[in-house]
Image: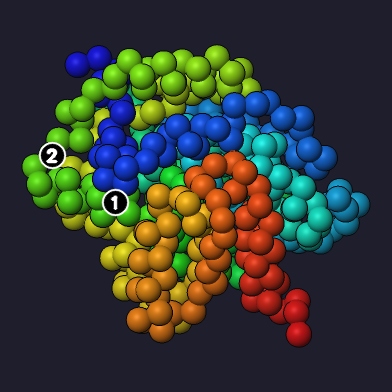
Amino acid sequence: MNSLSRCFSIVFLLIASLGTSISAQDQAAQMVEAPRPSGLETVEFFSPAVNRMMKFDIVFPSDYWETEDHYPVLYLLHGYMQNYTVWGRNLAAAFYARNINDLILVLPDGGNSWYVNWSESEDEQSNNWEDHIVQDVINYVDINFRTENRREGRAISGLSMGGFGAFAIGLRHPEMFVSIGSTSGALSYARSSAAAIAAGINPQSRQRGDEDQARFAEADAIISDIINIPGFSTQEERTPIGTVFTTEEQAKAYDPYEIIYNVPRSQMPHIYIDSGTEDGLIAEARELVQLLMVNNVPFDYMQSRGQHNSEYWRRSIGHMMTIQHEVMRRALGNRP
């Protein structure tokens, strides 16, 4: 089996179960190269978790270089077929961060990994993408920049695949994040994976068709030069080769609907969820909201007219960032 057929993984199963093409919709946000916003810089560093050089964009407050202040940090995870440049350069996150001003914004790259530590990797890859975020990116940021290096000064959020990643990582590491968020999140990814494994479906058995290859080629023609990470710029390179989960238990260990019960109330992070009303993933958001209500877990929820696309994300991101920034500021004692 060639790498094209092996690497596409269980994302097909999620798309089929939702009746919507996440990859095609997410792709819309990154198809145009945007100018570099003020205050945004790109950092290149070595990540031991994935054994390769990686990049992330970072947005500094306007007075960062003139003060000795320490700042809270919001980590934003991109969606499937997106990359580290999308949030800051295409979806206005840098603009909102500079308006908030006392906030550092970090925009990591997770490829098409779903931000989990893969059960099996092939071609000598190292696909520990949860560790890439939790250990490598966060440690690098805290060591090299003036951050509020504690739970109260750290939040994580994401869109689509990144919304799942933010919830999975945040609930698996509640001691690290005071707030977790999801916009248009594919929150049932791990649960769908567990169900597929229970049904005896091989996540590697479905091969990428001509339409998928054509879509990947179209994206590569525009964004691979923008990403510019050696060996990790095309969609084929950015899609891990191997198996995300080999057992139901491994999948359930990343399922937000399951692992939220493992978080002690004293460590439960603030939870933010939003979705467009015409988004096929809104049912997942509403289901999680209902679970939170039944279990008396506080949360912020927003829905408004919109689809699973960049138009909706540009409208929702300011609301999400403002709320999570306020949560951090209050946790740090900087609000009445």
- For the question of whether residue 225 can be seen, the reply is yes
Q: Nearer the viewer, residue 68 or 114?
A: 114
**SS at badge 1:** helix
Q: Which residue is disc 1 drawn over?
A: 190
**Looking at the image, do the residues carrying marks 1 and 2 touch, with CB atoms under 8 Å apart?**
no
Residue at image x 37%, y 41%? 20
Q: Quadrant of the C terminus?
A: bottom right
* Number of other residues with Cα within 10 Å of mark 1, as a class: few under 14, some 14 to 19, many 20 or more: many
Mark 2 belongs to which amino acid? Ile
**SS at badge 2:** loop
Q: In the picture provided, is 182 more to the left or to the right than 227?
A: left
Residue at image x 53%, y 69%? 301
Picture layout, residue 233 above or below residue 101: above
Q: In the picture provided, is 228 more to the left or to the right than 213?
A: right
Q: Quadrant of the N terminus?
A: top left
Q: Which residue is disc 2 drawn over?
A: 201
* Number of other residues with Cα within 10 Å of mark 2, as a class: few under 14, some 14 to 19, many 20 or more: some
Which labelled disc corresponds to residue 324?
Answer: none
Residue 56: image quadrant is top right
Mark 1 belongs to which amino acid? Ala
Q: Report how far apart the C-alphas of labels 1 and 2 lie in the structure.
A: 14 Å
Position of residue 240 measured from the top left corner of the image (x, y, whole percent): 35, 30
Residue at image x 41%, y 39%? 22
Q: In the picture provided, is 90 more to the left or to the right than 182?
A: right
- For the question of whether residue 117 can be seen, the reply is no
Position of residue 189 measured from the top left corner of the image (x, y, whole percent): 32, 49
Residue 320: image quadrant is bottom right
Position of residue 313 measured from the top left corner of the image (x, y, whole percent): 60, 48
Marks 1 and 2, the one that precedes in the sequence: 1
Residue at image x 32%, y 65%? 257
Residue furthest left in the image: 200
Picture layout, residue 218 above or below residue 172: above
